[in-house]
Amino acid sequence: MSAVDVPVPVTIHRVTNLDLWVGDHVWPFADKRREEIDAHFAQRQAEQPKLWNGRVLLGRQPRFDGVYFSAEYFETDFASFMAWRDWGFPDVSVFNGFGMGVIRASDGAIVLGVMGPHTANAGKVYFAGGTPDPSDVRNRRLEIASSVAREVKEETGLSRLDYHAADHWHCVEAGSLVAMLRVLDVDQPGDALKARIETFLAREAHPELSGVHLVRSKADFLPTMPRFVTAYLTMLLHGDD
């Protein structure tokens, strides 16, 4: 069992405002363990050659205050992020805070994707989304809504014109992650929407997803779904959105 699979308590917060800014923090973990990190990433790249050591954003100092969620973010390299994650989150002062779009069809089916074999989370079943990067920053503010729209488009082909985004977010805390989830309602039934996304994936040279999975009840849960995903789906299926 990997560190990301260890069961942890899950807390879900309903918020309407995300106050996320990007500072100049230099991550001591990345500096002090540089040689180990580089060796670890080289090994991961040998296993998955398409992994790329780009720039990503991690958070610190998270705070929930009523309908507000605030945090400071900083830039680091993907290799350091992966090492921190794979080694069981040794630096508890930082967290992985990312946005995801919860695509919901007109008949209530929730659309999830199976991550492709070339990705860092191969085989896992998630909502569309991912770790934010510098392209999601505007005037030192991290725009999670833009990050979600970008990830949804890249993974499923759906643009902002294809769905209605909820006015609020659910922040799901689970150990060293905070998933900022937003329901995206599409005016199309589940099976048709699944086929539409599969058609998009078939046209892509290197799709991020290897498949599409619909959830209509707990019977559709899979062992490859992280706990924060099943916890949120359980709440959503009960009508608490």
Image (cartoon, grey):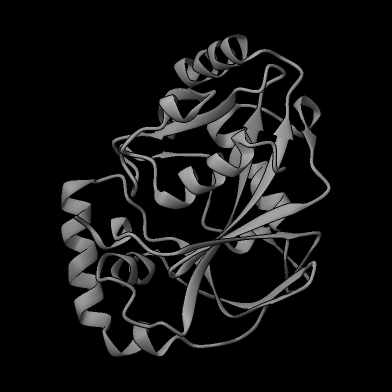
Left-right relation of 166 to 213: right
Instruction: Please give the name of the residue rendered at 44% of the width and 60% of the height, measured from the top-left corner.
Output: 54
Q: Measured from the top left, where is residue 143 in percent x and y?
A: 73, 60
Residue 65 visible from this viewpoint: yes
**Tag count:** 0
In this rendered view, identify the residue nearer to me: 206 or 188. 188
Q: Pick whichever, 77 or 65, lies toward us.
A: 65
Check the picture and name the quadrant holding the N terminus: bottom left
Give the side of residue 3 with respect to residue 208, left or right.
left
- Position of 186 compared to 181: left or right? right
Quarter assignment of residue 20: bottom right
Residue shown at 78% from the left, 72% from the top: 66
Front-most of residues 160 and 65: 65
Left/right placement of residue 181 relative to residue 19 reads left
For the point 72% across and 42% down, which residue is it? 241
**Which picture quadrant has residue 118?**
top left
Q: Is 95 drawn above or below residue 151 in the view shown? A: below
Residue ID at (30%, 55%): 5
Residue 149 in percent (x, y) is at 69, 42
Location of residue 58 in the rendering, given as x and y in whole percent from the top left corner: 52, 71
Figure check: 106 above or below 72 = above
Q: Position of residue 35 (x, y in %)?
A: 21, 80
Q: Is residue 63 above or below residue 135?
A: below
- Snapshot quadrant of residue 138: bottom right
